[in-house]
Image: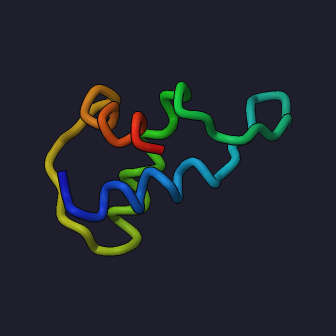
Amino acid sequence: MPIETMQAVQWALSQTYTDSLGYEYPVTKEDPIIVDLVRQYFNDHDIEYNTFSYGDLTPFLEQV
């Protein structure tokens, strides 16, 4: 994982998402959407990364 992963996880946890009914929720450590948000952070900041899953983020989530 890139060295910026912790920053990406912290950023993802500061985001919200909207469900299909229009309700907005804060992202939590348990939300699978966190993987997409970390990818978005990497892409937005031109950070190269390999394929990863929620399990790869677990060590970082445990530190937050």
- The residue furthest left is 50
In x, y percent, where is residue 5?
Answer: 31, 56
Q: Is 35 in front, or is 3?
A: 3
Up-down: is 46 above or below 7? Answer: below
| Quadrant assignment, res 56 | top left
Q: Is 35 in front, or is 55?
A: 55
Number of disc labels = 0
Q: Viewed as shown, does residue 22 lie left or right of 61?
A: right
Please give the name of the residue rendered at 28% of the width and 26% of the height, measured from the top-left corner. 55
Please give the name of the residue rendered at 22% of the width and 38% of the height, measured from the top-left corner. 52
In x, y percent, where is residue 20?
Answer: 76, 29
Q: Is 39 in front, or is 14?
A: 14
Up-down: is 28 above or below 30? Answer: below
In x, y percent, where is residue 24?
Answer: 81, 40
Q: Viewed as shown, does residue 49 lie left or right of 17?
A: left
| Quadrant assignment, res 19 | top right
Please give the name of the residue rendered at 36% of the width and 52% of the height, measured from the top-left corner. 39
Q: Viewed as shown, does residue 61 lie left or right of 17?
A: left
- The residue furthest front is 63
In x, y percent, where is residue 32?
Answer: 48, 28
Please give the name of the residue rendered at 48% of the width and 39% of the height, measured from the top-left corner. 34
| Quadrant assignment, res 14 | bottom right
Give the color scheme: rainbow, by chain, secondary structure or one colour.
rainbow
